[in-house]
Image (cartoon, helix red, strand yellow):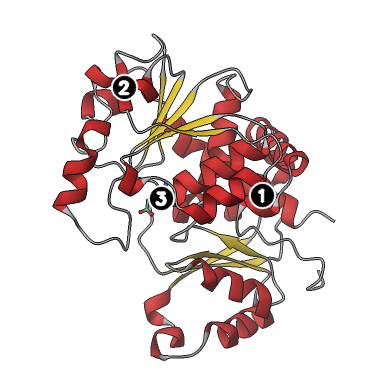
Amino acid sequence: MSKKNKKDFLTLKDYDSKTISYLLDIAGDVKSDPLKYSKVLEGKNIALLFDKHSTRTRLSFEAGISQMGGNAIYLDAKNLQLSRGETHADTAKIFSLYLDAVVIRTFSHRTVEIFAEEGSIPVINGLTDMYHPCQVLSDLFTIKEAGLLSPGPKITYMGDSNNVTNSLMVGLSKLGIKITISSPSEYKPGQEIMKYIESIKGSNVSIVSDPVKAAEDADIVYTDVWISMGDAESDQKVKKLSSYQLNRELLSHAAKDVIIMHCLPAHRGEEITAEVLDGSNSIVLKQAENRLYAQKALLAYIFES
Ligand code: CP
Ligand code: NVA
């Protein structure tokens, strides 16, 4: 694969609706016929360079790569010369000598961009402070499986506006699907991402600060932690967000069969009650399971000849 033709996956911003739909189709195929993909990564070495904790992303990539005949190499960034000052650009060039792709979980989004620019292998964003595209690719697949990936249903994201929110807004907007974001004004999506969203043809994002209004008649309510990895702990923030907690009372305003989504890990009793997280309307385990199929689909697409 030449540097020019390599397929990076840094953010869904770089993907058009046709390619996103294609990836979702492959995910369905991977799920129903995994054996068809068992040799796709034969002879390929894929590193997972992680600067932050992970359970789902790490395991689903490691298992998925192995199921596709490839070799996953987990690297804790702390143990690399990176942590002693070797630059990202130099590291990217070295990775490109030995590896076929790299999945990176880190703080600054600029880091994954540098790897993509300086190296010659595909770079997959396994979460940065700005975006979590692997999560949202999988969530789009989960929403599609639930029969709700269309402009009709009301999809609400409630709580802190973070990397998952940004990717959700981008992914849904690319597909022409409306999303309501409900956060207190201090924690609503930033100007830069909103400007980008407005530039997407057919985008329809409403910012509704009143959580009851945002929950009203919602078919899907999605939430994520209030303090993301790398964020400072803040009692004030938690207090401000308390009326955005997914609990029985707030969800009584939603559609009767509302679907509850959370990328996990959850802080039970903070952004969501245990009763809601474990309740019959919650599809959080399906979301976690689908990470495997969506990422295998992404890898199949990246190495497609
Ligand atoms: N949802 C998600 O990315 O989980 P991990 O942080 O466990 O990878
Ligand atoms: N917003 C969360 C997502 C974790 C998967 C974080 O960045 O910590």
Q: Give the side of residue 305 with respect to residue 239, left or right.
A: right
Count the numbered circles shown: 3
Alpha-carbon distance for marks 1 and 2? Answer: 37 Å
Q: Nearer the viewer, residue 87 or 235?
A: 235
Q: Residue at x 24, y 42 (%)?
A: 267
Q: Nearer the viewer, residue 98 or 102?
A: 102
Q: Residue at x 60, y 64 (%)?
A: 71
Q: Position of residue 85 (x, y in %)?
A: 43, 91
Q: Nearer the viewer, mark 3 or mark 2?
A: 2
For the residue carrying disc 2, how many other residues have a C-alpha within 10 Å: few (<14), some (14-19), or many (20+)? some
Report whether residue 132 is seen: yes
Q: Residue at x 20, y 38 (%)?
A: 270
Alpha-carbon distance for marks 3 and 2? Answer: 21 Å
Name the residue beneath numbered marker 1: 298
Q: Is mark 3 within 8 Å of ligand 2?
A: yes
Q: Give the side of residue 7 with respect to residue 227, left or right.
A: right
Name the residue beneath numbered marker 3: 162
Question: Circle 1 sits in a helix, a strand or a loop, which is it?
Answer: helix
Q: Quadrant of the C terminus?
A: bottom right
Report whether residue 40 is seen: no
Q: Position of residue 259 (x, y in %)?
A: 42, 21
For the residue carrying disc 1, how many other residues have a C-alpha within 10 Å: few (<14), some (14-19), or many (20+)? many
The label shown at residue 212 is 2
* Kind of residue at badge 1: Leu
